[in-house]
């Protein structure tokens, strides 16, 4: 082989073995069945379910690690999610009711408490936990991929539609299903006269000394506003919070996104008249005007403050834009303290100047990365801050695009916990079950129960299950009645009931269905006042606090039924409804207050006697009734009663319930026993599988 040919051959080897990976990265398209956008808690939770079901997926994250939001927010580093690790219970499912930070997995030890034992943990703990979650579960996450544009594409696959994601290097990622879990990063802003003079929550100094002896006006009354106020409460001279709505307290509204007690110390200093306060007023119509430092009118005060070592930044006045004499844009520099208009009332609440004005209005979803073909509409419920979604979290008008996590909160905005980790970890699981049914023909998981076991299963769920407990009024258990047995489906989005069959793969029979949810009462009440709770089971429907409710429908509710449901009801009016009376301990296990009323309700819906009997009674019924009670037919007649228990067998003979001449060496294996019952007139008709 001559020398030029050797060189050419070596070049080919180098091309084949040296460049393919680099070439693939920069010049080809990567395709996956599922693309998960964002490696926050919702994205990783979905990654776990996709990994467990062995699907082709990738999680794309723009930063260098998971949970990057928590590396920045909350700014003052204390989470408001409860990390209650001591409950007095060893039941893992029950404990998740009070663990608001852990993600779901099949690893009982993969809990947030491994990184923090604090009731309100430091925010830096959460990225550590998420990194641990990724590593120990082996999730497929690709970091450093900043997706800047998303568009829909027509596909030749059976799904018919896909999505193309373009990153910062121009590389395309294509997928059949797009799962958006980007959270909410864009600060919510309101444009008004002088809004450019306002500092943002996302960039304010964190050192309380920066606010020493300063008057501070905070726009907003949510947790970010109160968190900011709390951090400077001991340094600022005066703190006022201003927004259109009065402050809403979580312990009054039962909504975890409202003001939490861990941040509300300013309420004390306001009500006890210690210079701080809350004021209501519109934001769009106000004006913030800066008083220049060179004004002679305030030079004396300036010199006095400067001599004390305080750095002057100029002061800000709040007024109405319509009262300005010389409005000339967002920053009206011609307006000074000398010609600043005031209200006709000389005790206007915010008439004194401020050293700082801070915007703390929360965040909004980033719609800008979607083009017209892939952009979900904005939700009217959230005033455009969040995308509009179906009841199963698919974008309205964007098939195959689902929104997960905080950004999916438009479905239960201000009513449940879907915008928070302890809520959306369950809605993510519900979305995964929808995906499994739609794209892989895997029915929604169900458990087959005999109706005689239904009451016990319901009591177990209301006393242990964490999904319906956290996502109250949103996720519910569906019980499909099939006559002598039922199918039990857990945590279905109840607003999607009209689409139940297509989303779950299950059909509703002529016997109807039951829906179990937890919900708060509809009547306003003083959460801390006398008479706030109901204790009498006969008035359970008047319960104010969280309690289980069962709805019975003989047919599946329609879309029209759902639209015309009574005001405040999570579901349409049912054929029958049963409230289990609220309980101070959230333990619905009282024989008289909880179990017996529940049984009577089930008997009414099922037209069946669901009482439990001793084996001796079942034996007597079998000999004297053509059709013994259901409990006996599905238990005792399958040799679960007297048969196999020598003590009860002997007792039955001594009590005269069995002829003394009947002597079986091994009654539990005697093949003639079912025949004997048949001849006695008993109905041996049950063939229900009770192994679940």
Image (cartoon, rainbow, N blue to C red):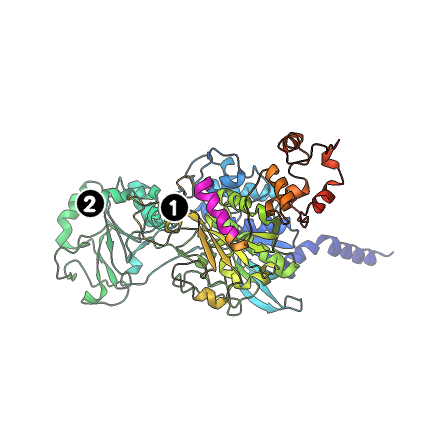
Neighbourhood count class around disc 1 (C-alpha, 10 Å): few under 14, some 14–19, many 20 upward: some
Q: Is residue 406 visible?
A: yes
Distance between the Cα atoms at labels 2 and 1? 24 Å
* Sequence order check, earlier mark of 2 and 1: 1
* Local SS, label 1: loop
* Local SS, label 2: loop
Among the 4 quarters of the image, the one containing residue 638: top right
- Which region shows up in magenta? 588-603
**Magenta stretch, main secondary structure class:** helix
Neighbourhood count class around disc 2 (C-alpha, 10 Å): few under 14, some 14–19, many 20 upward: some
Q: Is residue 597 magenta?
A: yes
Q: Nearer the viewer, mark 2 or mark 1?
A: 2
Q: Position of residue 210 (x, y in %)?
A: 29, 43
Q: How many marks?
A: 2
**Quick check: 428 left or right of 312?**
right
Q: Nearer the viewer, residue 609 or 521?
A: 609
**Quick check: 103 left or right of 646?**
left
**Quick check: 281 left or right of 539?**
left
In the picture, which quadrant includes the N terminus? bottom right
Above or below 671: residue 163: below
Q: Is residue 140 visible?
A: no
Residue for badge 1: 75
Q: Position of residue 675 (x, y in %)?
A: 74, 44
Residue for badge 2: 275
In the picture, which quadrant includes the C terminus? top right
Q: Nearer the viewer, residue 487 or 621?
A: 621
Q: Position of residue 355 (x, y in %)?
A: 24, 50
Q: Position of residue 333 (x, y in %)?
A: 23, 62
Q: Is residue 630 magenta?
A: no
Which residue lies at the image location 50% right of the left edge and 43% below the top edge? 127
């Amino acid at each position: 082989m001559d020398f030029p040919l050797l060189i050419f051959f070596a070049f080919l080897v180098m091309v084949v073995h040296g460049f393919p990976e680099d070439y693939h990265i920069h010049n080809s398209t990567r395709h996956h069945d599922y693309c998960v956008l964002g490696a926050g808690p919702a994205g990783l939770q979905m990654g776990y379910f996709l990994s467990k079901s062995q699907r082709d997926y990738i999680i794309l994250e723009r930063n260098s690690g998971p949970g990057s939001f928590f590396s920045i927010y909350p700014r003052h580093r204390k989470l408001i999610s409860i990390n209650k690790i001591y409950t007095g219970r060893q039941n893992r499912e029950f404990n998740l009711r009070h663990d608001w930070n852990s993600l779901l997995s099949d690893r009982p030890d993969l809990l947030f408490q491994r990184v923090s034992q604090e009731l309100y943990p430091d925010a830096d703990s959460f990225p550590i936990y998420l990194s641990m979650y990724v590593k120990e579960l082996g999730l497929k996450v690709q970091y450093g991929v900043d997706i800047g544009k998303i568009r829909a594409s027509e596909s030749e696959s059976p799904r018919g539609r896909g999505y193309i994601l373009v990153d910062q290097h121009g590389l395309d990622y294509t997928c059949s299903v797009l799962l958006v879990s980007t959270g909410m990063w864009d600060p919510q802003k309101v444009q008004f006269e002088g809004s450019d003079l306002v500092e943002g929550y996302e960039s304010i100094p964190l050192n309380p000394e920066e606010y020493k002896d300063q008057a501070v006006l905070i726009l907003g009354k949510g947790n970010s506003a109160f968190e900011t106020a709390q951090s400077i409460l001991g340094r600022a001279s005066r703190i006022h919070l201003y927004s259109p709505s009065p402050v809403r307290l979580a312990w009054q509204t039962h909504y975890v996104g409202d003001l939490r007690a861990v941040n509300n110390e300013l309420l004390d200093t306001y009500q006890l008249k210690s210079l701080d306060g809350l004021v209501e007023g519109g934001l769009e119509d106000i004006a913030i005007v800066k008083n220049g430092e060179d004004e002679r009118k305030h030079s004396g005060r300036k010199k006095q403050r400067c001599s004390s070592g305080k750095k002057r930044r100029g002061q800000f006045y709040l007024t109405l834009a319509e009262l300005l004499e010389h409005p000339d844009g967002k920053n009206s520099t011609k307006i000074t303290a000398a010609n600043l208009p005031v209200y006709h009332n000389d005790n206007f609440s915010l008439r004194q100047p401020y050293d700082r004005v801070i915007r703390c209005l929360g965040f909004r979803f980033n719609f800008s990365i979607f083009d017209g073909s892939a952009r979900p509409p904005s939700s009217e419920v959230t005033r455009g801050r969040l995308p509009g979604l179906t009841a199963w979290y698919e974008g309205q008008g964007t098939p195959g695009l689902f929104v997960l996590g905080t950004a999916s909160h438009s479905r239960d905005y201000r009513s449940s916990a879907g915008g928070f980790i302890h809520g959306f970890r369950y809605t993510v699981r519900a979305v995964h079950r929808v995906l499994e049914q739609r794209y892989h023909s895997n029915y929604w998981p169900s458990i087959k129960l005999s109706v005689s076991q239904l009451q016990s299963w319901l009591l177990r769920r209301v006393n242990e299950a964490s999904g319906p407990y956290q996502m109250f009024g949103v996720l519910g258990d569906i019980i499909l009645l099939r006559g002598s047995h039922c199918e039990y489906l857990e945590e279905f989005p109840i607003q999607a009931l009209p689409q139940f069959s297509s989303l779950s793969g299950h059909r509703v029979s002529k016997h109807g269905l039951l829906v179990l949810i937890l919900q708060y009462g509809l009547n306003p009440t003083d959460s801390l006042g006398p008479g706030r709770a109901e204790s009498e089971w006969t008035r359970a429907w008047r319960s104010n606090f969280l309690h289980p409710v069962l709805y019975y429908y003989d047919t599946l509710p329609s879309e029209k039924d759902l639209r015309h449901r009574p005001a405040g009801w999570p579901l349409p009016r049912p054929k029958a409804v049963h409230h289990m009376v609220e309980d101070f301990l959230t333990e619905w296990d009282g024989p008289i207050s909880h179990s017996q009323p529940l049984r009577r309700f089930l008997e009414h819906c099922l037209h069946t006697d669901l009482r439990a009997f001793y084996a001796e009674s079942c034996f007597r019924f079998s000999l004297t009734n053509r059709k013994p009670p259901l409990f006996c037919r599905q238990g005792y007649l399958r040799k679960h009663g007297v048969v196999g228990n020598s003590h009860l067998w002997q007792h039955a003979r001594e009590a005269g319930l069995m002829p003394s001449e009947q002597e079986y060496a091994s009654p539990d294996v005697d093949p003639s026993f079912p025949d004997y019952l048949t001849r006695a007139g008993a109905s041996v008709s049950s063939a229900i599988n009770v192994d679940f």
